[in-house]
Image: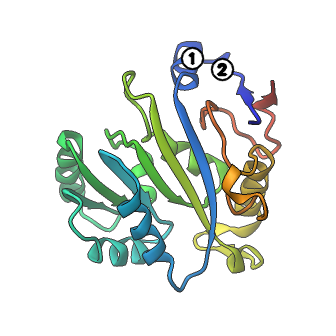
Amino acid sequence: MVHSRFRGDSDEVFYRGREAKNYKVELRPTRAVGKFETLLEVLKRESFRKALVVFNTVEEAVEFYMGLGDYGEKVLIQSRFSLEDRKAKGERVKSMKEGVVVGTQAIEAGLDFSSDLILTDLAPANSLIQRFGRFLRGEEERTGKAIVWYEEELLEKGQYKVYDASLAKRTLQYLEGKGERSPSSTTTPCSTTCTRRNRPLTGDWSPRWSAWSPT
């Protein structure tokens, strides 16, 4: 397993808490057709208490939410809701014991929620950091799983959903470089299944990735 260490000089207590977490990040290439079915299969297969599924567009988040089956309580959070609605949904999420939260970039700030399974579309580093801030937040929460999916055909265009494709691609390249193949994917590229363990996705994750260093 390849490890790297975040320099947590600015907030050592927070950093040490995140470093104590035990999880892996899996990178999963997808295509537009069949993407929702793949995500639903993950939810069926994985064991979790609270899952967070983050899309880059409202349209995708709404469509996926409408197709969710019975996973306990489920909440949709997106920017087109009124402020009053978002506050009400935030309170529901805060008290949630088990279930699935589906959202967009709207979850990246002001959402008091912690998941033990996060599925997120690829995004530039600063957005991924915010999304992972809703993953294993509690001190007692130590283990979980994260999947970052990406649509390969869009990375070759100028725009990746609402983001600059070059930024999204550079983030993916960084994640690929810090992972390694799982034992079950010895014949596939690292971009199919990569793992990262005990490395908090947070902090000054600049485009030069200068906040990370190998150990």
In this figure, which residue is indicated by the disc labeled 2?
Answer: 8
Tell me, yes or no, whether the two marked residues, 2 and 1, touch with CB atoms within 8 Å. Answer: yes
Residue type, mark 2 in image = Gly
Residue topped by disc 1: 16
| Residue 91 vertical placement versus 43 (above, below) | above
Q: Does the image show residue 103?
A: no
Callout 1 amino acid: Arg
Q: Which residue does the image show at 36% across and 49% down from the upper left? A: 47
Q: Nearer the viewer, mark 2 or mark 1?
A: 1
Residue 203 at what x, y percent from top left? Answer: 63, 32
What SS does tag 1 mark? helix
Q: Residues within 10 Å of mark 2 (few under 14, many from 20)?
A: some
What's the residue at 54%, 55% (across, down)? 147
Asked which secondary structure carries label 2, the reply is: loop
Q: Answer whether residue 56 is visible to the viewer in this image.
A: yes
Q: Quadrant of residue 215?
A: top right
Where residue 124 sits, quadrant-wise, is bottom right
Q: CA distance from mark 2 to mark 1?
A: 8 Å
